[in-house]
Image: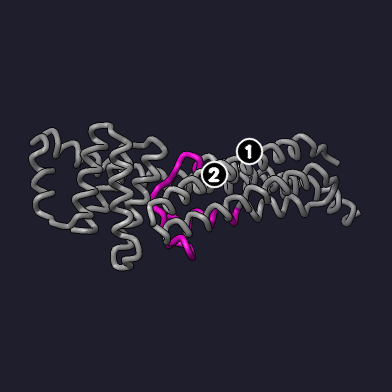
Amino acid sequence: MKTKLIASMMLGLAAISMLLFSNGIVSYAQSNSSEVTLGNNTTISSSNSTQVNNSTSQSDNPTVQSIDEAIKALNAGDKDTAKKLLLKAEESLEGKSSLEDAEKRVEAALAALKDGDINSAISHAEEAKKNLL
Amino acid sequence: MRNNKPIAYSLAGILVIIGIVYCLVANSEYEDSKEMAVMGIAGEASEKQFETSFFISAGVVNFILAGLVLKSKRSIIPYLASAGISAGLIVVYIASRTIGVPVVGVEYYVGRLDLISKVLQAIAIVLSGISIYNLRKPTALKEVA
């Protein structure tokens, strides 16, 4: 009887810990996503597209420009253009080991876009841009 | 001896659903690999092909495990295999989102299908554990007697 109780408790704990661990990763991803999205929205609401345009002009890097354009397209709801621009950025980052993190962020943005998760796509694109600046 | 059939059927059903989810993910990765190949992004295309093969294999393994669970009567091996493989896949997934895995590296996006499969795998581990417990209990009693 005692063994039965212990076994049930262990199984329950294993299940709960598994679920909590999965949820932990999601909440981490979501909190990351909301933080960056909030930042992005604030930028847009406070000064419309002025700051975005400034950041574009600050960098002559064509990859950063592609990502910037992709973010604008995502904000405008133009998924096809955003996808093309992100693929273009991905192409330019291909094989550059020093920019691997930015490449992975662009891939994540593409995956999120495919899933229909626009906020997450924007946040990953912003992260990719940060890694390139 | 306890009737383990309801748990075995539930576990088999969950394993089949996990297999289907993996096939859906594999199909998505395959589409991506084709798109990347057309764009001339060779490195990413081969990475996607590797992922496609991995997800198809994982799906097939889950279908086989479902069959073994349904077929087995008193053996705990299919349940041990189900729990072990599900736990292994969860560990690989967590590693892919944190420290990175060979070939693929670190992936940052947590997709909906990923979440569904991980929750189902956690349930599969719990059900496998209950089945193993149910099947081992009479043996233990006989040994004592």
- Name the mark on residue B27: 2
In this picture, residue A54 sits left or right of residue A2: left
Looking at the rendering, the stretch of residues picked out in magenta corresponds to: B87-115
**B48 relative to A88 in the view: left or right:** right
Look at the image and say whether residue B71 sits in the magenta stretch.
Answer: no
- Total marks placed: 2
- Other residues around mark 2 within 10 Å, as few (<14) / some (14–19) / many (≥20): some
Residue B17 is marked as 1
| Cα distance in 3D space between marks 1 and 2 | 15 Å
Q: Residue furthest bottom?
A: A97
Q: How many residues crowd around disc 1 within 10 Å: few (fewer than 14), some, or many (20 or more)?
A: many
Q: Nearer the viewer, residue B31 or B132?
A: B31
SS of the residue under disc 2: helix
- Residue at 50%, 53% in the rendered image: B93
- The residue furthest right is B145
Amino acid tagged 2: Asn
